[in-house]
Image: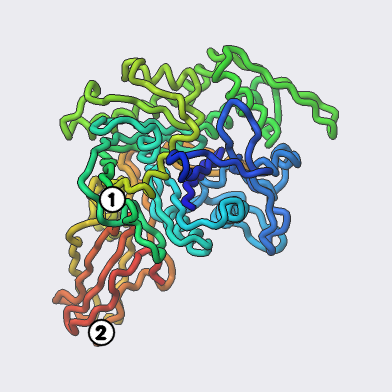
Protein backbone atom coordinates (compact mmCIF):
# COMPACT_ATOMS: atom_id res chain seq x y z
CA UNK A 1 0.00 0.00 0.00
CA UNK A 2 1.37 3.43 -0.97
CA UNK A 3 1.08 6.39 1.40
CA UNK A 4 1.92 10.10 1.07
CA UNK A 5 2.55 12.28 4.11
CA UNK A 6 2.45 16.07 4.03
CA UNK A 7 4.32 16.81 7.28
CA UNK A 8 3.41 20.40 8.10
CA UNK A 9 4.42 22.95 10.72
CA UNK A 10 0.86 23.19 12.08
CA UNK A 11 -0.92 20.13 10.66
CA UNK A 12 -0.03 16.88 8.93
CA UNK A 13 -2.09 15.20 6.21
CA UNK A 14 -1.93 11.55 5.12
CA UNK A 15 -3.28 10.23 1.83
CA UNK A 16 -3.37 6.85 0.09
CA UNK A 17 -4.22 5.65 -3.40
CA UNK A 18 -7.48 3.71 -3.43
CA UNK A 19 -6.96 0.77 -5.84
CA UNK A 20 -10.72 0.30 -6.27
CA UNK A 21 -11.69 3.87 -7.19
CA UNK A 22 -8.24 4.68 -8.66
CA UNK A 23 -8.43 7.97 -6.75
CA UNK A 24 -6.52 9.44 -3.80
CA UNK A 25 -8.21 9.62 -0.41
CA UNK A 26 -7.27 11.31 2.86
CA UNK A 27 -6.89 9.06 5.89
CA UNK A 28 -7.99 9.40 9.50
CA UNK A 29 -5.92 7.91 12.30
CA UNK A 30 -8.23 7.39 15.30
CA UNK A 31 -7.04 9.38 18.30
CA UNK A 32 -4.48 11.37 16.31
CA UNK A 33 -6.70 13.13 13.75
CA UNK A 34 -9.00 16.06 14.48
CA UNK A 35 -12.63 15.00 14.18
CA UNK A 36 -14.25 17.79 12.21
CA UNK A 37 -16.85 18.05 9.49
CA UNK A 38 -15.72 21.14 7.58
CA UNK A 39 -12.14 20.12 6.78
CA UNK A 40 -10.46 16.84 5.77
CA UNK A 41 -8.79 14.79 8.53
CA UNK A 42 -5.83 16.75 9.91
CA UNK A 43 -3.27 15.61 12.49
CA UNK A 44 -2.04 18.56 14.57
CA UNK A 45 1.77 18.60 14.43
CA UNK A 46 2.11 18.46 18.21
CA UNK A 47 4.24 16.27 20.47
CA UNK A 48 4.20 15.70 24.22
CA UNK A 49 7.14 13.62 25.49
CA UNK A 50 6.02 11.48 28.41
CA UNK A 51 9.32 9.57 28.76
CA UNK A 52 12.34 10.66 26.71
CA UNK A 53 14.64 7.65 27.20
CA UNK A 54 11.97 5.20 26.04
CA UNK A 55 10.56 7.45 23.31
CA UNK A 56 7.10 7.39 24.91
CA UNK A 57 5.06 10.23 23.39
CA UNK A 58 1.63 11.59 22.66
CA UNK A 59 1.14 13.17 19.24
CA UNK A 60 -1.53 15.05 17.30
CA UNK A 61 -5.02 15.36 18.77
CA UNK A 62 -3.98 13.18 21.74
CA UNK A 63 -1.99 16.17 23.01
CA UNK A 64 -5.00 18.50 22.78
CA UNK A 65 -7.39 15.97 24.29
CA UNK A 66 -5.20 15.87 27.40
CA UNK A 67 -4.85 19.68 27.49
CA UNK A 68 -1.05 19.58 27.25
CA UNK A 69 -1.04 22.23 24.51
CA UNK A 70 -2.42 24.82 26.94
CA UNK A 71 0.19 24.50 29.68
CA UNK A 72 3.72 25.85 30.17
CA UNK A 73 5.37 22.45 30.04
CA UNK A 74 8.85 21.79 28.62
CA UNK A 75 7.62 18.37 27.45
CA UNK A 76 5.24 19.99 24.95
CA UNK A 77 6.45 20.88 21.42
CA UNK A 78 4.78 22.70 18.56
CA UNK A 79 6.20 24.22 15.33
CA UNK A 80 9.19 21.88 15.72
CA UNK A 81 9.43 21.32 11.96
CA UNK A 82 10.91 24.82 11.70
CA UNK A 83 13.87 23.89 13.88
CA UNK A 84 14.84 20.71 12.01
CA UNK A 85 18.13 21.18 10.15
CA UNK A 86 18.28 24.85 11.19
CA UNK A 87 21.12 26.50 13.08
CA UNK A 88 19.06 27.71 16.03
CA UNK A 89 20.52 28.67 19.39
CA UNK A 90 18.20 29.02 22.38
CA UNK A 91 15.79 27.18 24.59
CA UNK A 92 15.87 23.39 24.28
CA UNK A 93 15.05 21.34 27.36
CA UNK A 94 16.72 18.38 29.00
CA UNK A 95 14.13 15.68 29.69
CA UNK A 96 14.76 12.56 31.76
CA UNK A 97 18.51 13.15 31.53
CA UNK A 98 18.51 13.59 27.73
CA UNK A 99 19.15 16.75 25.74
CA UNK A 100 16.24 17.08 23.32
CA UNK A 101 16.67 18.31 19.73
CA UNK A 102 14.09 19.30 17.14
CA UNK A 103 15.32 16.43 14.99
CA UNK A 104 14.45 13.99 17.79
CA UNK A 105 11.00 15.52 18.27
CA UNK A 106 10.29 15.35 14.54
CA UNK A 107 11.42 11.73 14.39
CA UNK A 108 9.23 10.81 17.37
CA UNK A 109 6.25 12.46 15.68
CA UNK A 110 6.66 10.82 12.27
CA UNK A 111 7.55 7.43 13.72
CA UNK A 112 4.48 7.42 15.97
CA UNK A 113 2.19 8.44 13.10
CA UNK A 114 3.59 5.80 10.73
CA UNK A 115 3.57 3.05 13.36
CA UNK A 116 -0.14 3.72 13.95
CA UNK A 117 -0.69 3.75 10.19
CA UNK A 118 1.03 0.47 9.25
CA UNK A 119 -1.43 -1.97 10.89
CA UNK A 120 -4.36 0.08 9.54
CA UNK A 121 -3.06 -0.36 5.99
CA UNK A 122 -1.76 -3.92 6.33
CA UNK A 123 1.82 -2.72 5.87
CA UNK A 124 3.45 -0.07 3.67
CA UNK A 125 5.37 -0.80 0.49
CA UNK A 126 5.98 2.83 -0.52
CA UNK A 127 6.07 6.18 1.25
CA UNK A 128 6.18 9.64 -0.34
CA UNK A 129 7.13 12.64 1.80
CA UNK A 130 6.79 16.30 0.86
CA UNK A 131 9.34 19.05 1.61
CA UNK A 132 9.24 22.87 1.43
CA UNK A 133 10.83 24.62 -1.56
CA UNK A 134 13.30 26.50 0.67
CA UNK A 135 14.35 23.40 2.63
CA UNK A 136 18.09 22.95 2.94
CA UNK A 137 19.86 19.64 2.43
CA UNK A 138 20.17 19.19 6.20
CA UNK A 139 16.37 18.86 6.45
CA UNK A 140 16.11 16.41 3.57
CA UNK A 141 19.06 14.40 4.92
CA UNK A 142 17.33 14.18 8.32
CA UNK A 143 14.13 13.02 6.62
CA UNK A 144 16.02 10.32 4.72
CA UNK A 145 17.63 9.06 7.96
CA UNK A 146 14.22 8.86 9.67
CA UNK A 147 12.94 6.79 6.75
CA UNK A 148 15.84 4.33 6.82
CA UNK A 149 14.58 2.98 10.15
CA UNK A 150 11.02 2.42 8.89
CA UNK A 151 9.67 -0.92 7.63
CA UNK A 152 8.96 0.56 4.19
CA UNK A 153 10.34 -0.75 0.89
CA UNK A 154 10.50 2.52 -1.09
CA UNK A 155 10.69 6.15 0.02
CA UNK A 156 10.51 9.24 -2.20
CA UNK A 157 10.48 13.03 -1.69
CA UNK A 158 8.87 15.83 -3.68
CA UNK A 159 8.53 19.60 -3.21
CA UNK A 160 5.23 20.52 -1.58
CA UNK A 161 3.92 22.99 -4.21
CA UNK A 162 4.89 20.65 -7.06
CA UNK A 163 2.80 17.94 -5.39
CA UNK A 164 -0.06 20.41 -4.98
CA UNK A 165 -0.07 21.13 -8.72
CA UNK A 166 -0.59 17.42 -9.32
CA UNK A 167 -3.18 17.22 -6.53
CA UNK A 168 -5.56 19.61 -8.25
CA UNK A 169 -5.71 17.23 -11.21
CA UNK A 170 -5.82 19.89 -13.90
CA UNK A 171 -5.34 19.35 -17.63
CA UNK A 172 -2.12 18.72 -19.54
CA UNK A 173 -0.11 21.55 -21.07
CA UNK A 174 -1.31 23.96 -18.40
CA UNK A 175 1.01 26.33 -16.54
CA UNK A 176 0.01 26.36 -12.90
CA UNK A 177 1.13 28.68 -10.11
CA UNK A 178 0.90 27.09 -6.67
CA UNK A 179 0.90 29.38 -3.63
CA UNK A 180 1.51 27.07 -0.69
CA UNK A 181 1.14 29.08 2.52
CA UNK A 182 0.98 26.95 5.64
CA UNK A 183 2.01 27.27 9.26
CA UNK A 184 5.74 27.66 8.72
CA UNK A 185 6.60 28.40 5.09
CA UNK A 186 5.50 30.36 2.05
CA UNK A 187 6.31 28.43 -1.13
CA UNK A 188 5.55 29.56 -4.68
CA UNK A 189 6.08 27.20 -7.60
CA UNK A 190 5.33 27.53 -11.30
CA UNK A 191 4.70 24.09 -12.80
CA UNK A 192 3.83 22.90 -16.31
CA UNK A 193 2.08 19.56 -16.67
CA UNK A 194 3.07 17.69 -19.83
CA UNK A 195 1.97 14.39 -21.27
CA UNK A 196 5.22 12.49 -21.75
CA UNK A 197 6.22 9.48 -23.81
CA UNK A 198 6.25 6.01 -22.28
CA UNK A 199 8.00 6.13 -18.95
CA UNK A 200 10.48 3.32 -18.37
CA UNK A 201 12.51 4.53 -15.44
CA UNK A 202 11.95 5.19 -11.73
CA UNK A 203 10.60 8.62 -10.96
CA UNK A 204 10.83 11.11 -8.13
CA UNK A 205 13.66 11.42 -5.65
CA UNK A 206 14.28 7.94 -4.27
CA UNK A 207 15.73 7.67 -0.79
CA UNK A 208 15.31 3.95 -0.35
CA UNK A 209 15.00 1.15 -2.90
CA UNK A 210 12.85 -1.95 -2.62
CA UNK A 211 12.96 -5.09 -4.70
CA UNK A 212 9.95 -4.16 -6.80
CA UNK A 213 10.40 -1.91 -9.79
CA UNK A 214 8.65 1.43 -9.91
CA UNK A 215 7.94 0.79 -13.57
CA UNK A 216 4.64 -1.00 -12.94
CA UNK A 217 2.89 1.64 -15.04
CA UNK A 218 5.68 1.86 -17.63
CA UNK A 219 3.40 0.89 -20.51
CA UNK A 220 1.10 3.78 -19.83
CA UNK A 221 1.72 7.34 -20.87
CA UNK A 222 2.86 9.29 -17.85
CA UNK A 223 2.64 12.95 -16.98
CA UNK A 224 5.71 15.08 -16.44
CA UNK A 225 5.55 17.92 -13.92
CA UNK A 226 8.19 20.41 -15.05
CA UNK A 227 9.11 23.04 -12.46
CA UNK A 228 9.67 26.36 -14.25
CA UNK A 229 10.24 28.74 -11.33
CA UNK A 230 10.07 28.70 -7.55
CA UNK A 231 10.51 30.90 -4.51
CA UNK A 232 10.23 30.24 -0.80
CA UNK A 233 10.81 31.67 2.65
CA UNK A 234 10.24 31.01 6.34
CA UNK A 235 6.93 32.78 6.85
CA UNK A 236 3.61 31.29 7.88
CA UNK A 237 0.58 31.13 10.11
CA UNK A 238 2.76 30.48 13.15
CA UNK A 239 4.25 33.96 12.73
CA UNK A 240 0.79 35.52 12.55
CA UNK A 241 -0.17 33.70 15.76
CA UNK A 242 2.93 35.13 17.47
CA UNK A 243 2.16 38.64 16.23
CA UNK A 244 -1.41 38.37 17.55
CA UNK A 245 -0.19 37.15 20.95
CA UNK A 246 2.20 40.10 21.11
CA UNK A 247 -0.66 42.44 20.15
CA UNK A 248 -2.90 41.11 22.92
CA UNK A 249 0.00 41.20 25.39
CA UNK A 250 0.52 44.88 24.54
CA UNK A 251 -3.14 45.97 24.44
CA UNK A 252 -4.56 43.77 27.23
CA UNK A 253 -1.54 42.84 29.30
CA UNK A 254 -1.96 39.11 28.60
CA UNK A 255 0.97 36.83 29.32
CA UNK A 256 2.63 35.08 26.38
CA UNK A 257 1.80 31.42 27.06
CA UNK A 258 0.77 28.31 25.10
CA UNK A 259 -2.81 29.07 26.17
CA UNK A 260 -2.86 32.62 24.76
CA UNK A 261 -1.09 31.35 21.62
CA UNK A 262 -3.83 28.75 21.11
CA UNK A 263 -6.55 31.39 21.66
CA UNK A 264 -4.87 33.75 19.19
CA UNK A 265 -4.74 30.95 16.62
CA UNK A 266 -8.48 30.35 17.08
CA UNK A 267 -9.19 34.07 16.60
CA UNK A 268 -7.15 34.05 13.37
CA UNK A 269 -9.03 31.00 12.06
CA UNK A 270 -12.39 32.64 12.85
CA UNK A 271 -11.36 35.70 10.83
CA UNK A 272 -11.08 33.50 7.73
CA UNK A 273 -14.88 33.29 7.64
CA UNK A 274 -16.03 36.17 9.89
CA UNK A 275 -15.33 39.89 10.01
CA UNK A 276 -15.23 39.90 13.84
CA UNK A 277 -13.80 37.18 16.10
CA UNK A 278 -13.53 36.56 19.82
CA UNK A 279 -12.39 33.78 22.12
CA UNK A 280 -13.23 33.43 25.81
CA UNK A 281 -11.42 31.04 28.14
CA UNK A 282 -11.73 30.43 31.89
CA UNK A 283 -8.62 29.13 33.59
CA UNK A 284 -10.00 26.92 36.41
CA UNK A 285 -6.56 26.59 38.01
CA UNK A 286 -5.90 30.32 38.43
CA UNK A 287 -9.57 31.38 38.35
CA UNK A 288 -8.85 33.89 35.60
CA UNK A 289 -10.83 34.51 32.44
CA UNK A 290 -9.45 35.60 29.08
CA UNK A 291 -11.32 37.33 26.28
CA UNK A 292 -9.55 38.05 23.00
CA UNK A 293 -11.39 40.09 20.35
CA UNK A 294 -10.22 41.22 16.93
CA UNK A 295 -11.69 42.30 13.59
CA UNK A 296 -10.30 41.93 10.08
CA UNK A 297 -9.25 45.57 9.87
CA UNK A 298 -7.16 45.22 13.05
CA UNK A 299 -5.60 42.02 11.68
CA UNK A 300 -4.73 43.70 8.37
CA UNK A 301 -3.09 46.59 10.25
CA UNK A 302 -1.01 44.16 12.31
CA UNK A 303 0.09 42.35 9.15
CA UNK A 304 1.06 45.64 7.45
CA UNK A 305 3.00 46.78 10.51
CA UNK A 306 5.01 43.54 10.47
CA UNK A 307 5.89 43.93 6.77
CA UNK A 308 3.86 40.83 5.92
CA UNK A 309 2.64 41.95 2.50
CA UNK A 310 6.07 43.30 1.55
CA UNK A 311 7.51 39.83 2.16
CA UNK A 312 4.78 38.26 0.04
CA UNK A 313 5.57 40.73 -2.75
CA UNK A 314 9.27 39.79 -2.61
CA UNK A 315 8.50 36.12 -3.19
CA UNK A 316 6.02 36.84 -5.98
CA UNK A 317 8.41 39.28 -7.71
CA UNK A 318 11.21 36.70 -7.60
CA UNK A 319 9.00 34.01 -9.09
CA UNK A 320 7.60 36.21 -11.87
CA UNK A 321 11.10 37.40 -12.79
CA UNK A 322 12.21 33.77 -13.17
CA UNK A 323 9.14 33.10 -15.33
CA UNK A 324 9.77 36.11 -17.60
CA UNK A 325 13.32 34.94 -18.26
CA UNK A 326 11.66 31.90 -19.86
CA UNK A 327 9.19 34.00 -21.85
CA UNK A 328 6.25 33.36 -19.51
CA UNK A 329 4.11 36.37 -18.59
CA UNK A 330 1.38 36.66 -15.96
CA UNK A 331 -1.29 36.21 -18.64
CA UNK A 332 0.24 32.85 -19.65
CA UNK A 333 -0.48 31.32 -16.23
CA UNK A 334 -3.63 29.22 -16.59
CA UNK A 335 -4.55 28.78 -12.93
CA UNK A 336 -3.43 29.91 -9.47
CA UNK A 337 -3.87 27.20 -6.84
CA UNK A 338 -4.01 28.26 -3.20
CA UNK A 339 -2.81 25.66 -0.69
CA UNK A 340 -2.32 25.69 3.10
CA UNK A 341 -4.25 27.08 6.02
CA UNK A 342 -2.92 30.64 5.76
CA UNK A 343 -4.31 31.11 2.22
CA UNK A 344 -7.80 31.08 3.75
CA UNK A 345 -7.22 34.53 5.27
CA UNK A 346 -9.15 37.11 3.21
CA UNK A 347 -6.12 39.45 3.40
CA UNK A 348 -4.00 36.85 1.61
CA UNK A 349 -6.65 36.18 -1.02
CA UNK A 350 -7.00 39.92 -1.63
CA UNK A 351 -3.24 40.14 -2.08
CA UNK A 352 -3.29 37.35 -4.69
CA UNK A 353 -6.02 39.19 -6.64
CA UNK A 354 -3.65 42.14 -7.10
CA UNK A 355 -1.65 39.92 -9.46
CA UNK A 356 -4.23 37.58 -11.03
CA UNK A 357 -7.80 37.64 -12.31
CA UNK A 358 -10.24 36.16 -9.76
CA UNK A 359 -11.53 33.50 -12.19
CA UNK A 360 -8.04 31.95 -12.35
CA UNK A 361 -7.75 31.57 -8.57
CA UNK A 362 -8.78 28.28 -6.96
CA UNK A 363 -8.89 27.49 -3.26
CA UNK A 364 -11.18 24.48 -2.88
CA UNK A 365 -8.48 22.01 -1.73
CA UNK A 366 -6.20 23.92 0.65
CA UNK A 367 -5.38 20.99 2.95
CA UNK A 368 -5.48 17.87 0.78
CA UNK A 369 -3.84 18.90 -2.49
CA UNK A 370 -0.22 18.33 -1.41
CA UNK A 371 -0.58 14.84 0.08
CA UNK A 372 -2.95 13.65 -2.64
CA UNK A 373 -0.80 15.11 -5.39
CA UNK A 374 2.32 13.44 -4.00
CA UNK A 375 0.66 10.08 -4.61
CA UNK A 376 0.94 10.76 -8.33
CA UNK A 377 4.65 9.87 -8.12
CA UNK A 378 3.66 6.28 -7.46
CA UNK A 379 1.38 6.40 -10.52
CA UNK A 380 4.21 7.11 -12.95
CA UNK A 381 4.47 10.91 -12.89
CA UNK A 382 7.98 12.18 -13.54
CA UNK A 383 9.31 15.36 -11.90
CA UNK A 384 11.70 17.67 -13.78
CA UNK A 385 13.16 20.08 -11.23
CA UNK A 386 16.10 22.40 -10.56
CA UNK A 387 18.17 23.53 -7.58
CA UNK A 388 16.73 26.34 -5.50
CA UNK A 389 19.99 26.82 -3.57
CA UNK A 390 23.60 27.02 -4.75
CA UNK A 391 26.47 24.90 -3.44
CA UNK A 392 29.83 26.48 -2.67
CA UNK A 393 33.18 26.16 -0.90
CA UNK A 394 34.51 28.39 1.86
CA UNK A 395 37.65 30.47 1.26
CA UNK A 396 39.61 33.22 3.01
CA UNK A 397 38.78 36.64 1.57
CA UNK A 398 42.08 38.55 1.99
CA UNK A 399 40.61 41.90 0.92
CA UNK A 400 37.90 41.87 3.61
CA UNK A 401 39.86 39.72 6.08
CA UNK A 402 37.08 37.21 6.61
CA UNK A 403 35.77 33.90 5.32
CA UNK A 404 33.52 33.99 2.27
CA UNK A 405 31.85 31.48 -0.04
CA UNK A 406 32.56 30.69 -3.69
CA UNK A 407 29.66 29.16 -5.60
CA UNK A 408 30.54 26.00 -7.57
CA UNK A 409 27.04 24.79 -8.55
CA UNK A 410 24.58 27.59 -9.28
CA UNK A 411 20.92 28.05 -8.44
CA UNK A 412 18.78 26.86 -11.35
CA UNK A 413 20.95 23.83 -12.16
CA UNK A 414 18.80 20.91 -13.33
CA UNK A 415 19.29 17.65 -11.46
CA UNK A 416 20.38 14.93 -11.56
CA UNK A 417 23.40 16.57 -13.21
CA UNK A 418 24.61 15.04 -16.47
CA UNK A 419 28.21 16.21 -15.93
CA UNK A 420 30.04 16.86 -12.64
CA UNK A 421 31.70 20.18 -11.76
CA UNK A 422 35.47 19.89 -11.33
CA UNK A 423 37.70 21.68 -8.78
CA UNK A 424 41.48 21.20 -8.52
CA UNK A 425 43.40 22.03 -5.32
CA UNK A 426 47.05 22.00 -4.28
CA UNK A 427 48.89 21.90 -0.97
CA UNK A 428 49.73 25.23 0.69
CA UNK A 429 52.37 24.00 3.19
CA UNK A 430 55.51 21.88 3.12
CA UNK A 431 54.82 18.25 4.11
CA UNK A 432 51.06 18.89 4.25
CA UNK A 433 49.40 15.67 5.52
CA UNK A 434 45.84 16.41 4.41
CA UNK A 435 43.53 18.85 2.66
CA UNK A 436 40.45 20.32 4.34
CA UNK A 437 37.51 21.84 2.51
CA UNK A 438 34.27 23.20 3.98
CA UNK A 439 31.34 22.79 1.59
CA UNK A 440 28.05 24.59 2.11
CA UNK A 441 24.57 25.10 0.73
CA UNK A 442 24.00 28.77 -0.05
CA UNK A 443 20.64 30.46 0.35
CA UNK A 444 19.26 33.48 -1.46
CA UNK A 445 21.39 36.65 -1.49
CA UNK A 446 18.28 38.80 -1.29
CA UNK A 447 16.61 39.74 1.97
CA UNK A 448 15.30 36.60 3.65
CA UNK A 449 13.90 35.27 6.90
CA UNK A 450 15.49 33.17 9.60
CA UNK A 451 14.01 31.21 12.49
CA UNK A 452 15.04 32.05 16.05
CA UNK A 453 13.91 31.75 19.67
CA UNK A 454 11.91 34.47 21.42
CA UNK A 455 11.72 33.07 24.93
CA UNK A 456 10.52 29.54 24.20
CA UNK A 457 8.74 30.46 20.94
CA UNK A 458 10.13 29.65 17.50
CA UNK A 459 9.44 32.68 15.31
CA UNK A 460 11.10 34.49 12.40
CA UNK A 461 12.92 37.73 11.76
CA UNK A 462 14.22 39.48 8.66
CA UNK A 463 17.79 38.93 7.52
CA UNK A 464 19.51 41.87 5.82
CA UNK A 465 19.97 41.70 2.05
CA UNK A 466 23.79 41.85 2.21
CA UNK A 467 24.10 38.56 4.10
CA UNK A 468 23.84 35.07 2.65
CA UNK A 469 22.22 32.25 4.57
CA UNK A 470 24.70 29.35 4.44
CA UNK A 471 24.25 25.84 5.83
CA UNK A 472 27.68 24.11 5.97
CA UNK A 473 27.36 20.42 5.11
CA UNK A 474 30.61 19.17 6.64
CA UNK A 475 31.84 21.78 9.13
CA UNK A 476 32.57 19.43 12.01
CA UNK A 477 35.61 17.58 13.32
CA UNK A 478 36.67 14.77 11.02
CA UNK A 479 34.36 15.80 8.20
CA UNK A 480 36.36 18.78 6.89
CA UNK A 481 39.27 16.57 5.81
CA UNK A 482 38.43 15.35 2.33
CA UNK A 483 41.91 14.02 1.42
CA UNK A 484 44.68 12.32 3.39
CA UNK A 485 47.90 12.91 1.40
CA UNK A 486 50.33 9.99 1.14
CA UNK A 487 53.04 11.04 0.44
CA UNK A 488 52.56 14.50 2.01
CA UNK A 489 51.83 17.45 -0.26
CA UNK A 490 54.07 20.37 -1.26
CA UNK A 491 53.17 23.81 -2.66
CA UNK A 492 53.59 24.52 -6.34
CA UNK A 493 51.49 21.85 -8.06
CA UNK A 494 47.94 20.57 -8.24
CA UNK A 495 47.41 17.61 -5.91
CA UNK A 496 43.73 16.61 -5.79
CA UNK A 497 40.77 16.80 -8.16
CA UNK A 498 37.25 17.05 -6.73
CA UNK A 499 34.17 16.19 -8.78
CA UNK A 500 30.88 17.66 -7.51
CA UNK A 501 27.61 16.02 -8.56
CA UNK A 502 23.96 16.50 -7.50
CA UNK A 503 22.03 13.22 -7.66
CA UNK A 504 18.36 12.49 -8.39
CA UNK A 505 17.58 12.87 -4.68
CA UNK A 506 18.90 16.47 -4.76
CA UNK A 507 21.88 15.52 -2.57
CA UNK A 508 25.42 16.77 -3.20
CA UNK A 509 28.05 14.05 -3.71
CA UNK A 510 31.82 14.31 -4.23
CA UNK A 511 34.55 12.15 -5.71
CA UNK A 512 38.17 12.98 -4.75
CA UNK A 513 41.15 11.80 -6.79
CA UNK A 514 44.84 12.08 -5.83
CA UNK A 515 46.58 13.46 -8.96
CA UNK A 516 50.01 12.31 -7.76
CA UNK A 517 49.18 8.68 -7.01
CA UNK A 518 46.06 8.35 -9.21
CA UNK A 519 44.21 6.91 -6.19
CA UNK A 520 40.50 7.57 -5.64
CA UNK A 521 40.28 8.86 -2.06
CA UNK A 522 36.50 9.33 -1.96
CA UNK A 523 34.00 7.97 -4.47
CA UNK A 524 30.53 9.42 -4.96
CA UNK A 525 30.38 10.26 -1.24
CA UNK A 526 27.34 12.09 0.17
CA UNK A 527 28.82 15.32 1.55
CA UNK A 528 26.37 15.41 4.47
CA UNK A 529 27.67 11.99 5.56
CA UNK A 530 31.39 12.85 5.59
CA UNK A 531 32.96 11.92 8.92
- Tell me the element at label 2: strand
Q: Secondary structure at mark 1?
A: strand
x 37%, y 42%: residue: 133
Within-10-Å neighbours for mark 1: few <14, some 14–19, many 20+? some
Q: Quadrant of residue 165?
A: top left
Which label belongs to residue 488? 2
In the picture, measured across the screen, residue 143 lies left or right of residue 421, that is right
Quarter of the rendering occupied by the C terminus: bottom left
x then y, percent, for residue 512: 25, 73
Q: Which is closer to the viewer, label 2 or label 1?
A: 1
Which residue is labeled 1 in the image? 390
Q: Is residue 363 above or below residue 214?
A: above
Circle nearer the N terminus (2, 1): 1
Residue displayed at 73% across by 54% down:
50
Left or right, 400 with reference to 308: left
Q: Locate residue 404: give its quadrant.
A: bottom left
Between 240 and 154, the residue placed more toward the observer is 154
Labelled disc at residue 253: none
| Residue 21 seen in the current view | yes
Coordinates of residue 4 in the picture (x, y in percent): 47, 47
Q: Position of residue 89 (x, y in %)?
A: 54, 51
In this rendering, the answer to whether 115 lies above or below 277 is: below
Residue at image point 60% right, 20% down: 270
Judge the density around disc 2: few (<14), some (14-19), many (≥20) Cα neighbours within 10 Å.
Answer: some
Image vertical order of residue 278 relative to residue 448, above or below? above
Residue situated furthest bottom in the rendering: 487
Q: In this view, which residue lies farthest toward the left?
A: 493
Query: Front-most of 324 and 72?
Result: 324
Way the structure is coloured: rainbow
- Location of residue 318 in the rendering, given as x and y in whole percent from the top left corner: 29, 33
Q: Is residue 453 left or right of residue 75?
A: left
Res 312 quadrant in image: top left
Amino acid sequence: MGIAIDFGTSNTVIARWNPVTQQPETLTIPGLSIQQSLNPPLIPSLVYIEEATQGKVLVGQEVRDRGFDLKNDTRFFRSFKRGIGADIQGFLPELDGENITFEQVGQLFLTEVIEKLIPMQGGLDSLILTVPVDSFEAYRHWLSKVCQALPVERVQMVDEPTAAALGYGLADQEILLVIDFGGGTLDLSLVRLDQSVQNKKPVGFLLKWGNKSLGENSRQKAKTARVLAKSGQNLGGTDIDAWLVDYFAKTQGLAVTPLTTRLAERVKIQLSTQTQASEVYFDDENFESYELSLNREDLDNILKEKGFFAQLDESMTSLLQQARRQGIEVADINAVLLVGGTVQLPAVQTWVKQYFQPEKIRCERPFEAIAQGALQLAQGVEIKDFLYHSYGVRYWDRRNQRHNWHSIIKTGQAYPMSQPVELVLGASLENQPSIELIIGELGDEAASTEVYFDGDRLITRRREADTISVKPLNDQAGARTIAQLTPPGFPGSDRIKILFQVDEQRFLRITVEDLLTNDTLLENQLVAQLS
